[in-house]
């Protein structure tokens, strides 16, 4: 099996939390107030800069300001990852005349991810500095947990982009498939995979492939 595309895996994990940061941005964004706080950081190198930054940190809206900035950056990165994921489908696929047997086609993986990982984080208090630290610590822990698992394919953004996920077995696996009897996860877009037609595939990581019919 080809080498894992860990950068793509990590990118899809980060992309999975885009709904969280979209909701956080809607919940906490206050343009006029946050522009005022941003200005206090801009003047950091002036004579009164340190004092202004200290005032900004003590502001009750400081936590909302920080997560709003993070949310904007995160959503921009999500768009870049989505464009990259679409672009990767133009090259690098392997075609060995293989056919697959589709085992299951769950249609609720995105919703499961939202309920399990995203919504609990949305309820955290980020207004105080302590609450902000707790929120960011929990987010990092969840991302590290997902990095060590193969649940990154349960991506609500991919579901919104009309990608499908399914489990499958190879019927006539090529020699690079180390465990031919295992059940793998496929991601596809558009029409469902036809079991009686050969497929082309690209390996991501942890037994997850992008798959299309030839």
Image (cartoon, rainbow, N blue to C red):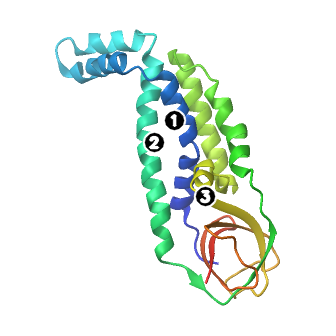
Question: x and y percent of residue 182 in the render?
Answer: 80, 73
Disc 3 target residue:
162
Using the image, determine if residue 174 lies above or below residue 5: below
Q: Nearer the viewer, residue 144 or 84?
A: 84
Can see residue 149? no
Is there a contact, CB below 8 Å, between mark 1 and mark 3?
Answer: no
Residue sticking out furthest to the left: 47
Question: x and y percent of residue 35 in the render?
Answer: 31, 21
Under circle 3, the secondary element is loop
Mark 2 vs mark 1: which is more N-terminal? 1
Disc 2 target residue:
75
Q: Quadrant of the C terminus?
A: bottom right
Does residue 43 appear left or right of residue 68 in this picture?
Answer: left
Is there a contact, CB below 8 Å, between mark 2 and mark 1?
Answer: yes
Task: Name the residue rendered at 53%, 42% in the picture.
Answer: 18
Does residue 100 appear left or right of residue 50 in this picture?
Answer: right
Can see residue 153? yes
Residue sticking out furthest to the front: 191
Task: Name the residue rendered at 64%, 89% in the picture.
Answer: 96
Q: Residues within 10 Å of mark 1 (few under 14, many from 20)?
A: some
Disc 1 target residue:
22
Cα separation, mark 2 vs mark 1, equals 7 Å
Cα separation, mark 1 vs mark 3, equals 19 Å
């Amino acid at each position: 099996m080809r080498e894992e595309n860990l950068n793509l895996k990590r990118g899809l994990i980060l992309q999975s939390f885009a709904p969280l940061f979209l909701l956080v941005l809607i919940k906490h964004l206050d343009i006029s107030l946050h522009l005022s706080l941003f200005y206090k950081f801009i003047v950091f190198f002036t004579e009164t800069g340190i004092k202004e930054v200290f005032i900004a940190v003590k502001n009750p809206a400081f936590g909302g300001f920080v997560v709003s900035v993070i949310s904007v950056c995160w959503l921009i990165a999500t768009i870049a990852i989505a464009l990259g994921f679409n672009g990767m489908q133009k090259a690098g696929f392997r075609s060995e005349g293989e056919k697959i047997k589709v085992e299951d086609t769950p249609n609720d993986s995105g919703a499961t991810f939202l309920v399990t990982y995203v919504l609990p984080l949305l309820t955290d208090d980020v207004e105080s500095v302590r609450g902000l630290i707790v929120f960011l610590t929990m987010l990092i822990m969840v991302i590290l947990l997902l990095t060590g698992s193969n649940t990154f394919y349960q991506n609500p953004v991919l579901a919104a982009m009309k990608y499908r996920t399914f489990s499958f077995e190879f019927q006539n696996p090529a020699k690079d498939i180390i465990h031919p009897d295992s059940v793998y996860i496929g991601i596809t877009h558009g029409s469902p995979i036809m079991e009686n037609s050969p497929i082309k595939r690209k390996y991501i990581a942890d037994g997850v492939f992008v798959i299309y019919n030839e």
